[in-house]
Image (cartoon, grey):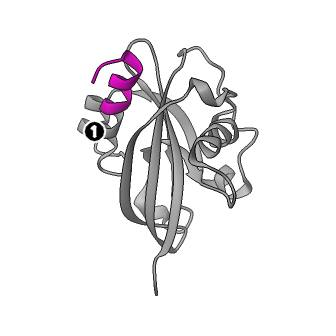
C-alpha cells in the first residue's frame, strides 16, 4: 500500500525560560505504542498556506489564538515517514516558533473527534529532557525544538 503524502504546519510555542509546549498523543490504531510527545500542528487544508494552517492548528489543538505575524519562521522543515491510526504517511512538516507565556490557558475544546481520542495532555519540555525521555515524535523533535528556541531568542 502506498504512503499518503501529507503536508503539515506545526507550531513550537517557547516560554521565556526556554521550554516548548508539546502535546502528548497516542495512536488510536496502535495502543501498544504508548503515549509520545509531539508538536502542535496538523495537515494543511486545500487552499490554505502553511502560516494560516499553523495559526488554525494552534487554535484547534491548544485553544491559543494568535495573529499570523506573531509566528516566527518557518524555522525548519522536516520530512518523515510514520504510521497513525493504521495509515502510512510520508510527511513534509513546516515548523514555526512563537514566544508564549507559560501561564497561557490551554484548551482542548476545539479538537476534532479523532484528536479527542488521542490527545492526552499538554506540557512544557526542554529539548534535553525530551531527548533523555526518548518519547518525542519525530525523533528529531528535540533538535527542532532547539532551533525554535534560538529563533524566539533572536539567536542564529
Q: Quadrant of residue 17?
A: top left
Q: Nearer the viewer, residue 31 or 59?
A: 59
Q: Position of residue 9 (x, y in %)?
A: 53, 48
Q: Is residue 54 visible?
A: yes
Circle 1 Cα neighbour tier, 10 Å, few/some/many (<14 / 14–19 / ≥20): few
Of residues 80 and 125, the one nearer the viewer is: 80
Looking at the image, residue 145 lies above or below residue 78? above
Look at the image and tell me in which quarter the C terminus lies.
Answer: top left
**Is residue 154 on the magenta stretch?**
yes
Q: Residue at x 46, y 47 (%)?
A: 94
> Range of the magenta residues?
146-156
Regarding mark 1 in the picture, which secondary structure is present there?
helix
> Residue tagged by mark 1?
143
Residue under the image location 37 percent in, 58 percent down: 79
Q: Please tell me whether the stretch drawn in magenta is mainly helix, strand or loop.
A: helix
Viewer-proximal residue among 30 and 81: 81
Across and down, in percent, residue 151 comes to 37, 25
Q: Does the magenta-highlighted stretch encompass residue 152?
A: yes
Residue 4 in picture, x, y percent from top left: 51, 74
Q: Judge from the rendering whether residue 104 lies leftward or rightward of residue 36; answer left or right.
A: right
Location of residue 51 in the rendering, given as x and y in whole percent from the top left corner: 59, 41
> Compared with residue 138, is residue 4 higher up or lower down, i.e. above or below?
below
Q: Is residue 123 left or right of residue 79?
A: right
**Going 76% across and 38% down the picture, which residue do you hit?**
109
Amino acid at each position: 500500500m502506498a504512503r499518503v503524502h501529507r503536508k503539515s504546519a506545526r507550531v513550537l510555542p517557547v516560554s521565556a525560560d526556554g521550554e516548548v509546549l508539546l502535546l502528548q498523543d497516542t495512536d488510536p490504531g496502535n495502543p501498544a505504542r504508548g503515549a509520545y510527545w509531539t508538536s502542535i500542528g496538523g495537515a494543511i487544508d486545500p487552499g490554505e498556506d502553511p502560516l494560516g494552517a499553523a495559526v488554525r492548528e494552534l487554535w484547534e489543538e491548544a485553544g491559543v489564538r494568535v495573529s499570523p505575524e506573531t509566528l516566527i519562521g518557518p524555522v525548519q522543515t522536516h520530512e518523515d515517514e510514520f504510521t497513525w491510526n493504521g495509515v502510512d504517511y510520508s510527511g513534509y512538516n513546516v515548523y514555526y516558533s512563537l514566544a508564549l507565556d507559560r501561564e497561557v490557558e490551554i484548551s482542548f475544546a476545539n479538537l476534532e473527534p479523532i484528536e479527542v481520542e488521542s490527545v492526552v495532555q499538554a506540557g512544557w519540555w526542554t529539548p534535553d529532557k525530551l531527548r533523555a525521555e526518548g518519547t518525542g515524535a519525530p525523533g528529531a523533535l528535540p533538535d527542532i525544538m532547539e532551533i525554535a528556541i534560538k529563533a524566539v531568542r533572536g539567536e542564529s
